[in-house]
Image (cartoon, rainbow, N blue to C red):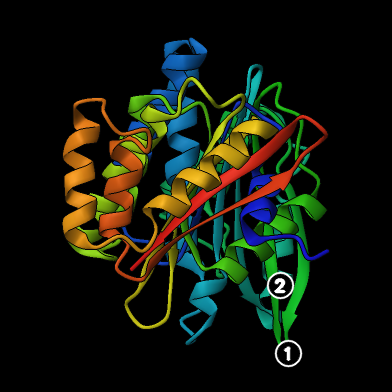
Amino acid sequence: MEVPPAFSLYRALSGGTFALLLGDPFRDAQTARLIELAEAVAERQGLSKGARARLAFVLVEAFQNIIRHRPPVDGLEQRSSFLFGAVPTGQQVITCNPVADADLPALRTALGSVLGKDADTLKDLFLRGLQANAASAKGGAGLGLIEMARRSGRDLGHAVEPLEAGVHRFMLQVLLGDAAPWSFDRVADACHAQEAQQVVAAMLGEPAPALLNALLGLVQETGLGGEPLHACLLAATQYIDDGAEHRSGPVLLSVHRRAASGWSVLVGSEAPAREAGHLEGILEGVRGGSAFHLKRRYRAALQGEDPAGAGLLELAMRATGGLTAGRWALDADRALVWVEARS
């Protein structure tokens, strides 16, 4: 049986307390939103001031590396990915960027100058680079690489995989705290899911308001979808609130690009198997309703008088390209249940 895309994305991001996946378009304006997200994660994990600063620096530097160093070739910009994962004992930040084969030797040389070095040596390297006004090595190295390694306190993980003729994907992993590293097979799977599903942004975790707000800001700063997409995301957060008593695990919220200027919003979570069937029954009663019918039900839902809930009904009103639902059994008693609103 073919694995549905929603479950593929859910599986790629599972395994921690929080995960974020970003794809093109990457914009400088998103940097401030990443700092907001880092602060929200740090607050939930009770990180010290120093640990918060390290996390924010690594997130921003890694994100900027994608923007600075990916090749200016049509199509390749959509093959970059940014991953951030958190577990109770630490965090990791992973970037995946296309690199021309001709640039790989210089990149490996730059990494060789950093790997295995202690904090004092890395600090000296950084200071010498500042004094010499050193330029970043082509392909993703330089002062930022040195400083990420120093602040991590652990060796940088890295791997390459072929993308197409003359191009490889370079994957860089920065670990903080005692986070266990994702395998690069798993990283590659997440990158492949991002490409195949044209993921702009996706998060998996407990839907704290600060995390949801940061995700909304990251999407808004891309310029994709404008106000209609923002309104649909707000409806998705309402849908998440409406279903809080029924879910039994983390929430997946993702935004995808579609043909031309289209987009979709997907929201899902684990639920008891019986709730999955219940949701599909409710959705069947919502799908295909006229605008007048949906608005009337929406007003009733605001008064607590419609079992569909205000969030699902607003998603249906925003889904000019249709509203769909699906489920995937996780075991005998649980299923991943999702809805997707398309423009």
| Label 2 crowd (10 A; few <14 / some 14-19 / many >=20) | some
Q: Is residue 321 above or below residue 18?
A: below
What kind of element bears circle 1? loop
- Which residue is depicted at the point 33% across and 35% down? 309
The quadrant of the rendering that contains the C terminus is bottom left
Residue ID for mark 2: 104
Q: Nearer the viewer, residue 311 or 156?
A: 311
Residue ID for mark 1: 165
Name which of mark 1 and mark 2 comes first in the sequence.
2
What kind of element bears circle 2? helix
The quadrant of the rendering that contains the N terminus is bottom right
Q: Is residue 124 above or below residue 171?
A: above
- Which residue is depicted at the point 33% across and 32% down? 36
Q: Position of residue 3 (x, y in %)?
A: 75, 60
Q: Position of residue 304 (x, y in %)?
A: 26, 25
Q: Nearer the viewer, residue 292 or 78?
A: 292
Q: Is residue 42 above or below residue 113?
A: above
Name which quarter of the figure residue 192 lies in.
Answer: bottom right
- Which residue is depicted at the point 53% across and 25% down? 246
- Three-letter residue code for mark 2: Leu
Q: Is residue 184 above or below residue 33?
A: below
